[in-house]
Image (spheres, grey):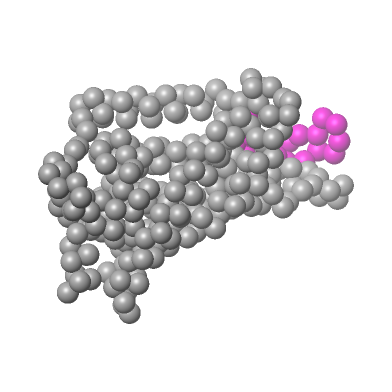
Amino acid sequence: MEAGVFGPRYDTIAPEITRAFEERQELLPYVFAVEFVAFTIAFIFLGRKKAVISKPDDTVLVYSLFQRVVLLLNIVIMIYLFITGFSITFGNITGGGAIAYFMRWTHEIVGLGWIPIWLILTVIAFKDHKFFKRPSGKLWNKIFLRGKYKPMYRINYYAYVAFGFLLALSGFLLWFIFPTAENYVHVIQFRRLMLFMHFMASAVISFFIFETIYSYVIAVKGYLPGLITGRLPREYLEELRPDVLVEMEKENN
């Protein structure tokens, strides 16, 4: 499609991308509504898993301090990016002012800071490493998360990696690439494409993040306190995470 109302004519990239980006305010509520309904139905029909704990003091250190810091930072930062991203997307509704400006500015700063967190978590949460040689099991498991992925959790992980990469790449390029008088049209087109990629990746990754939160925190009672303290009851692991307990027993042998 050609454009050139106020200047030389030029070819625009993928008009459907431009249209989808401009219509994001109309589409996004439907996306999150479907996700919310899906998880609500799952919770109603599947209920919540709960381990029978008769010895609450018999706990095991599952997460090292390093792992807890990375996991909790990822959770807190993504919540903040989610909130500020909504403020940017629905800016015509939330309006301007100091708060809106602060949220937009901090979204960019915090988003840039999330990139190394995403990269570290991508590495330490890679559990399909059975072919890797481990010089020390105890040292290895202070860095890499224990256990094995069930099929859905594996999908969640790879979706986090793939769409997190798109978010990081598009956000990084949007941060550093600005139009000038010489390349205005081309850069604007490219930034529009990156904005669409950013929006698309955020909408998709949110589903898998919500699914992970639902599976670990909402559908299973007792996980969040264990993530904060690093310790989980042994009976909890025996019933719900036996793969983690097996790895820990191998370390002690």
Q: In which quarter of the image is the N terminus?
A: top right
Depicted 72 relative to depicted 96: above or below: below
The residue shown at (49%, 59%) is 119
Q: Magenta stretch: give its range.
A: 1-22
Q: Which residue lies furthest to the front in this view?
A: 57
The residue shown at (80%, 34%) is 4
Q: How many labels does the image show?
A: 0
**Position of 11 compared to 116: left or right?**
right
**Observer able to see residue 158:** yes
- Residue 207 percent coordinates (x, y): 40, 37
Depicted 100 relative to depicted 201: above or below: above
**Quadrant hosting residue 87:** top right
Q: Is residue 189 magenta?
A: no
- Residue 245 percent coordinates (x, y): 19, 59
Q: Closest to the observer: 197 or 66?
A: 66
**Observer able to see residue 16:** no
Q: Which residue lies furthest to the top in this view?
A: 93
**Quadrant hosting residue 108:** top right
**Quadrant hosting residue 147:** bottom left
- Residue 31 percent coordinates (x, y): 45, 28
